[in-house]
């Protein structure tokens, strides 16, 4: 693909910009992701945040220009919208970047401004806007936001401005595609999932099949949108019936107040010896832990297309998840996993009890694994970007 002279992407500088954080050096998962993207023949440049308060600039599979991750979200937004936009403009004009990819419709405002400014300077760049979740409500279910109504109006104004100037859009699920379609009905949309380390999870070798395993795992950052408090309440009903079962909450305490409430809830329910908070762990460590668990649980209020569900399916681990956003795209209830309504503790308790009584749990895990391995791979991820970036280039060449 890299050496194909008919490939319109060869040697083009493509700039990604958004609020994601990257470490130096990259972890194994991110290194694989950008190596996969680079195989398209492009020169990728990523503008984002470092994992600390330092500015970082390095090359590893892509060129990374990472802004300092300042302690408050307002400061980070200001940094990316002002300094990030200036860097993106410089890259677009100096490096003649052919495509700008923004990681959310909010970030799309930066891409739209740079696209317009570059055109005034005689350079045409394409704009791709991605949506990885319900951008209209998700941020308000992660933390308390001062002046939330004003904040929402401003952010949605940014999103609408960006979408008006986009050349093509990328969605990760049917729900995110529908949301984009409603706001930008005339712009082409391409759908493919976010990156996950497919090889690591496909290679999991379980010591025991799910039917002979006991523990439960919920890999998700600790924020209200992930609704771990609902899971803890349901687990409290299951715990006396399954005294050998432990619940592992794997994820960074991104919202400290919510994390403290979860710890207090566990202590109040007398589950301190049964519920474990591990913090964030590597993808390889998560894959190993999935191979030891009976099921993965994800009880979010909103998602794009949750990668942890795909990772569990690839590893042969059954999934119970809430029927929100893109999750039903990959889980067929009772066939490749189980779906429950969000914030419905009785329904979740019923599903957990069924999980320990279901004789066909191994068959369901196998169905899910076959489905995931057929549908998701590094090759399909690279092909998704090839299609969307090629469409963007064609849009500005017309």
Image (tube, grey):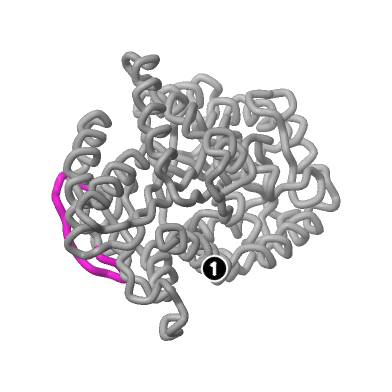
Q: Position of residue 41 (x, y in %)?
A: 39, 76
Say if residue 50 shows up in the picture.
Answer: no
- Residue 200 seen in render: yes
Up the image or down, 233 lies above or below 206; here it is above
Identify the magenta region.
52-63
The residue at which mark 1 appears reads as 383
Q: Tell me which residue sits at (30%, 54%) in the image.
A: 22
Quadrant in the picture for residue 177: top right
Residue displayed at 70% across by 29% down: 341
Which sits in the foreground, 238 or 17?
17
Q: Residue at x 59, y 41 (%)?
A: 246
Residue 7 in the figure: left or right of residue 62: right
Q: Secondary structure at mark 1?
A: helix
Residue 394: x percent and y percent?
46, 63
Q: Residue 132 placed where, x, y %?
A: 49, 44
> Residue placed farthest to the right in the image?
359
Q: Quadrant of residue 32?
A: bottom left
- Count of labels in the image: 1
Residue 55 belongs to the span the image colors magenta: yes
Q: Is residue 365 above or below residue 245?
A: below
150 lies above or below 110 = above
Give the quarter of the image for residue 299. Answer: top right
Q: Quadrant of the C terminus?
A: bottom left
Taking the spot 33% from the left edge, 62% from the top edge, the residue there is 98
Quick one: label 1, few (<14), some, or many (20+) residues within 10 Å? some
Q: Is residue 311 magenta?
A: no
Up-down relation of residue 335 to residue 345 (above or below): below
């Amino acid at each position: 693909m890299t050496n194909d002279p008919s490939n319109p992407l060869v040697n083009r500088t493509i700039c990604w910009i958004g609020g994601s954080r990257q470490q130096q050096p990259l972890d194994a998962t991110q290194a694989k992701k950008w190596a996969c993207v680079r195989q398209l023949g492009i020169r990728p440049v990523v503008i984002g945040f470092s994992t600390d308060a330092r500015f970082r600039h390095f090359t590893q599979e892509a060129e990374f220009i990472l802004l300092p991750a300042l302690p408050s979200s307002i400061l980070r937004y200001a940094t990316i919208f002002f300094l990030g936009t200036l860097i993106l403009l410089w890259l677009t004009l100096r490096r003649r970047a052919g495509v700008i990819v923004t990681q959310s419709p909010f970030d799309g405002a930066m891409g739209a401004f740079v696209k317009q400014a570059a055109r005034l300077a005689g350079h045409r760049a394409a704009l791709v806007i991605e949506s990885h979740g319900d951008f209209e409500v998700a941020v308000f279910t992660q933390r308390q936001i001062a002046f939330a109504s004003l904040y929402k109006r401003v952010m949605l104004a940014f999103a609408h401005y960006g979408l008006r100037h986009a050349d093509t859009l990328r969605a990760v699920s049917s729900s995110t595609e529908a949301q984009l379609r409603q706001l930008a009905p005339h712009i082409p949309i391409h759908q493919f999932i976010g990156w996950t380390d497919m090889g690591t999870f496909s290679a999991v070798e379980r010591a025991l099949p799910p039917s002979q395993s006991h523990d439960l795992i919920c890999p998700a950052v600790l924020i209200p949108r992930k609704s771990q408090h609902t899971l803890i309440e349901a687990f409290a009903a299951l715990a006396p019936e399954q005294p050998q079962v432990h619940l592992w909450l794997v994820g960074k305490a991104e919202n400290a107040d919510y994390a403290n409430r979860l710890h207090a809830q566990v202590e109040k329910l007398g589950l301190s010896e049964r519920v474990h908070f591990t913090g964030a762990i590597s993808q390889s460590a998560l894959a190993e832990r999935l191979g030891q668990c009976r099921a993965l649980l994800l009880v979010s209020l909103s998602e794009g297309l949750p990668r942890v569900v795909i990772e569990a399916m690839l590893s042969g681990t059954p999934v119970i998840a809430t029927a929100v956003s893109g999750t039903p795209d990959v889980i067929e209830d009772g066939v490749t996993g189980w779906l429950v309504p969000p914030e419905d503790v009785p329904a979740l308790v019923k599903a957990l009890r069924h999980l320990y009584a279901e004789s066909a749990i191994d068959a369901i895990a196998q169905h899910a694994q076959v489905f995931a391995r057929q549908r998701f791979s590094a090759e399909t991820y690279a092909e998704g970007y090839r299609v969307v970036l090629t469409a963007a280039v064609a849009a500005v060449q017309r």
